[in-house]
């Protein structure tokens, strides 16, 4: 399997409805809840990519471009963006869909970095043991 095929197969999508208990006093999705959704979906994509134990080591440049009101549908899409020796970066985009309107728009995007660990919690190569051709 090529690296690109592995990346394609690892892409992960999660949809949810923004109910009032997920919102702040502006009746929009809590930023912290959005970041938690992004961390979780990026973790799933990273794990599906390498099938190794991973930990989040950073979140970079999270851009909140559009407020997400209560009563919306969101889709979080995570895709491996780059692979290092012991780490990988996953880009996450959250799209906003108004429940009773067609179309969707990019609302939030960010990057998450993960490190692969062995049983002693020491970094290990991400691609070691995987059938990946360049």
Image (cartoon, rainbow, N blue to C red):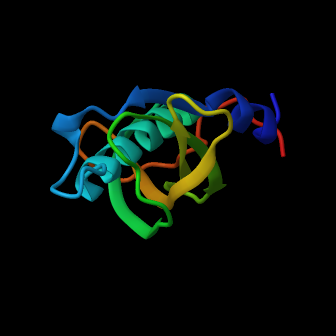
Q: Position of residue 42 (x, y in %)?
A: 46, 43
- Give the camera-side residue of 6 and 125: 6
- What residue lies at 60% left-to-right and 53% top-to-bottom? 106
Q: Nearer the viewer, residue 68 or 87?
A: 68
Left or right: 8, with 23 as reference point: right
Residue drawn at x 52%, y 59% as measured from the top left: 109
Q: Quadrant of residue 52?
A: top left
Pinpoint residue 123: horizontal percent, then vertical percent. Answer: 37, 53
**Residue 117 visible (yes or no):** no
- Image quadrant in which the N terminus is located: top right
Q: Nearer the viewer, residue 39 or 53?
A: 39
User: Where's residue 65, x and y in %?
Assistant: 50, 66
Image location (x, y in percent) of residue 87 = 49, 56
Q: How many marks?
A: 0
Q: Residue furthest bottom?
A: 61
58 relative to 81, above or below: below
- Which of the 4 quarters of the picture holds residue 3? top right
- Horizontal side of 27 relative to 77 (left or right) equals left
The residue located at (29%, 58%) in the rendering is 31
Taking the spot 57% from the left edge, 40% from the top edge, the residue there is: 77
Is residue 88 positioned above or below 45 on the image?
Answer: below
Question: Looking at this rendering, what residue extends furthest in the front direction?
Answer: 100
């Amino acid at each position: 399997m090529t690296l690109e095929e592995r990346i394609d197969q690892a892409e992960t999508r999660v949809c949810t409805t923004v109910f009032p208990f997920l919102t702040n006093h502006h009746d929009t999705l809590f930023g912290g809840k959005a970041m938690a959704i992004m961390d979780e979906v990026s973790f799933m994509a990273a794990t599906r990519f390498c099938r190794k134990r991973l930990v989040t080591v950073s979140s970079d440049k999270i851009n909140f471009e559009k407020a997400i009101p209560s009563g919306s549908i969101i889709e979080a899409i995570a895709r491996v963006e780059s692979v290092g020796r012991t780490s990988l970066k996953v880009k996450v985009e959250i799209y906003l869909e108004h429940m009773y309107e067609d179309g969707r728009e990019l609302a939030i995007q960010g990057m998450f970095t993960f490190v692969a660990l062995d049983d002693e919690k020491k970094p290990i190569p991400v691609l070691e043991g995987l059938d990946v051709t360049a």
